Image: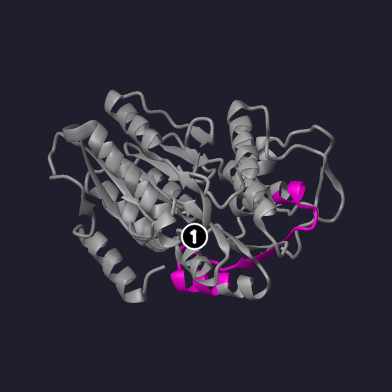
Amino acid sequence: MKNSRRILAGVTAAILGIGIVAGAAIADDKLKVGFVYVGPVGDFGWTYEHDQGRLAVEAALGDKVETSYVESVPEGADAERVMTQMALSGHELIFTTSFGYMDPTINVAAKFPDVKFEHATGYKRADNVSTYSARFYEGRTVIGHIAGHMTESNVIGYIASFPIPEVVRGINSAYLAAKAVNPDVQFKIIWVFTWFDPGKEADAATALIEQGADVIMQHTDSPAAMTIAEEKGVYAFGQASDMMQFGPTARLSSIIDDWAPYYVARTQAVLDGTWESMDTWDGIEPGMVEIGEFSDRIPEDVRASAAAIRDGIAAGTLHSFTGPINRQDGTPWLAEGEIADDLTLLTMDFYVEGVEGDIPN
């Protein structure tokens, strides 16, 4: 995600207690809130939006808090060392913002029972560990609908990060929405096995376009794919943030992650002494998932139908996974009108019928 020299420097500095970038002057009476980021704050995607949430905490709570962060922390042992240093340096609330931080978060939390931890996109909790995520698949239903209408080649390219349920779920929801309006649509998927690597993401976008894709989707963190789409004259969607500036012609819409209200509320709960371990999985209706402005390049009737889907999901009258839906091998999954339960969605490890290829191990 960063070159090895920068990763080593960042981790070493964090261990020494000088690598945490302070968002405000240190004061003993302030609640110290730490954020551990998997990418750089300037990725204009996943980490950028989490850092916007951190800044919102500062803006909302002022001199009651002092925030800090460490960026580009690899998932694994390095993350555990960074979290440990945060706890040792007096942080009372620590947000760990990537799926691969799950076990390190649990391990460090067990050593510091008086520190509150919030882990994004994971499923392991403890008395001092909460989990939170967003229903990104709802947003992918909206943009999948648009993509199915907008493709002329009937080939949609999808850049996937890691084969975890969150990513598989997104592929399935986007495909079902595209297929519903375009029976001839085909998804081509490239797994890049990284969250943030602009070079790999650009190469994947180029390869997908060479395979006939005229619409690109992504579940990775940089705007590299949007930049390639702009250069090649195909369509794309912003991921995690709007990304309009990287593809003013290519961008059709975007899925925007808004963590700010959650971060402010959970920090306030610690200040109030009301914080409890919990699981949060919010979507379009609470605003954790936002749909970016629709491009004028989308026909008016498609903009209207996409808005209706967005509003229907928010109202609870539409669900991304409503039967009949079969699994990839043709066996029934959901009967007519049946809605997928959250447990199945949270553990999804299969493609729906029509998605080609295998999910990597």
Q: Amino acid at mark 1?
A: Thr
The magenta region covers 178-205
Q: Which x, y percent locates residue 297?
A: 56, 53
Work out whether residue 41 or residue 181 is closer to the camera in this orientation and state it. Answer: 181
Residue in the foreground of this view, choosing between 70 and 138: 138
Residue 360 in view in this figure? no
Q: Residue at x 73, y 64 (%)?
A: 358
Q: Quadrant of the C terminus?
A: bottom right
264 and 234: which is toward the camera: 234
Q: Is residue 79 rendered to the left or right of residue 292?
A: left
State which quadrant residue 95 falls in: top left
Q: Position of residue 162 (x, y in %)?
A: 57, 61
**Residue carrying label 1:** 249
Label 1, secondary structure: give it. loop
Camera sees residue 187: yes
Q: Position of residue 310 (x, y in %)?
A: 59, 36
Magenta run includes residue 202: yes
**Residue 158 among magenta residues:** no
Q: Residue at x 64, y 53 (%)?
A: 147
